[in-house]
Amino acid sequence: MDMVKDSNVTKVSIFVLRPLTHKQLAQMYGVSWLTFQNWIKRVENEVGKKTGHFYHVPQVRKIFQLFGMPKQINMTLSEFEKLFAMEKQ
């Protein structure tokens, strides 16, 4: 979550976990599409194949667990813990 104050107005941007493409995930991790493709090949049996162009939410969660949270996402610690707690349920 990122809070920005602008003359008496506080804007909050929230990261919503949603289906993402290879390209979107590569951008989040700050690597090229080809580099991300090589990364994902190594863990495809754990993540599963994408459906069409997208990885579904459980797959995105697993990618975040395997590779760590991308540096371009700001989350609170409690949000981060909830993200991984959902996997255990």
Image (spheres, rainbow, N blue to C red):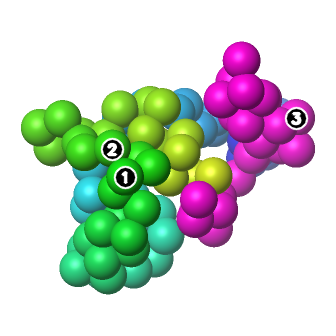
The spot of residue 22 in percent (x, y) is 27, 58
**Circle 1: residue type:** Asn
**Circle 2: residue type:** Gly
Tell whether label 2 touches label 1 (CB within 8 Å). Answer: yes
Mark-to-mark CA distance, 3 and 2: 27 Å
Residue, disc 1: 45
Secondary structure at badge 2 equals loop
Residue, disc 3: 78
Residue, disc 2: 48
Say which quadrant the C terminus sits in: top right
Residue nearest the observer in this picture, 34 or 72 = 34
Q: Which region of the structure is painted magenta?
A: 66-89
Say which quadrant the N terminus sits in: top right
Regarding residue 75, the answer to whether it shows in the image is yes
Secondary structure at badge 3 equals helix
Residue drawn at (70%, 52%) of the image? 74
